[in-house]
Image (spheres, rainbow, N blue to C red):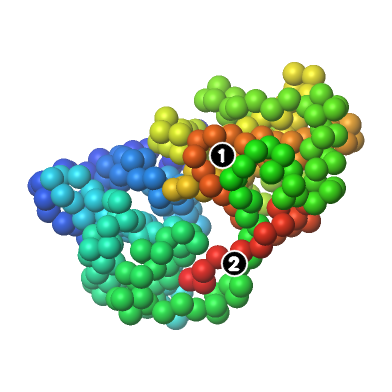
Amino acid sequence: MSFMNALLSSTLRFPRRPEGEDCIDDARIGDDEWDEFLARHPGSHHEQCSQYGRIRELYGYECHRVALRKGGRIIGGAQILVQSTPIGRLAVVLRGPLAVDDDPATMEQTVNKIDELARSRGYASIRAETFPTQAVARQALEKAGFETSRAWFGQRPSLLVSLDGSAQRLLEQMKPKGRYNIRLAARKGVMIQLGDEASLADFYRLHRLTAEHKEFPGFPFEYFQYLWKVFGARGRVQHFLACHGGKPVAAIFNALVDDRMYYCAGGLHRGPAESRLMANYLLHFHAMEWAGQQGCTHYDLIGVTRFKERIAHRTIYWPPP
């Protein structure tokens, strides 16, 4: 077993906390308990899960947590990644903090716990990166003294598709080239399948092809298996396969957060024949349709590329950290 696989397969066990007791000590917030909180929170994202923290630890980060409990269950919290640098310990909260039902009082208490942890562990700074929809979290952060800063990333554009309407309405939001390629893929016989646990391996094979082609490390297969285990049963993640002649030729893995579906990871067979199928266009189109059927109002492609611009025309800007 590789070091990465061994790390992902290990599970730390922590003593249970007394009911109703707040906690800012990450060593006493167990992985299973934390991920169970995320799984039942509709606004959570996989970048807050325990296994994401473990992967970042391989790149020199420490993973800390804060949590608030009521009746023994976590009702608010955040996972914090910390990196030691020559100018001090820099911390980041990705897609958080979180509070059950976005309750403002719980959110404010959670932010205060983050501040307590920062002081006790000597953080030089904390950066919080939120989704565009996490208004309550941002209000609580600002109330506690956090300030927005474009210095980290500048503007963060993304492309957004409204899912309010029919399939024809979806097509009307796209550029002519996008509509043409969707219909071309359908004419060529590309079929879209809703993924399940058994087809994760097919998704991952295509994902690795893309990672190797674009020269980025990607996540290990065990990570996607873990996400399916934690979030899949609750309909919070979903992958889709584009098949031609019974063979998977493209795939995407997406997350559902509140009322939006976010594109997370993809893969594409880059052979000459497969590339001409335009399967990626039909793949995202069906993912949009499916997301709308699940009650999502928008589909966020996360970022801007030439391909994405052909299937979405509305540019939004994620809030700065």
Residue at x 56% of width, y 39% of height: 292
Q: Position of residue 213 (x, y in %)?
A: 76, 46
Q: Is residue 88 left or right of residue 256?
A: left
- How many tags in the picture? 2
Q: Position of residue 60 (x, y in %)?
A: 47, 60
- Which label sits in the foreground, 1 or 2? 1
Quickly name the residue at label 1.
292
Q: Nearer the viewer, residue 2 or 126?
A: 126
Residue at x 39% of width, y 72% of height: 126
Q: Amino acid at mark 2?
A: Tyr
Residue at x 60% of width, y 27% of height: 194
Q: Quadrant of residue 234?
A: top left
In primary-sequence order, the first of circles 1 and 2 is 1
The secondary element bearing badge 1 is classed as: helix
The secondary element bearing badge 2 is classed as: strand
Residue 272, placed above or below residue 95: above
Q: Nearer the viewer, residue 312 or 66?
A: 312
Q: Amino acid at mark 1?
A: Gly
Cα distance, mark 1 to mark 2? 22 Å
Quickly name the residue at label 2.
317
Residue 221, placed above or below residue 79: above
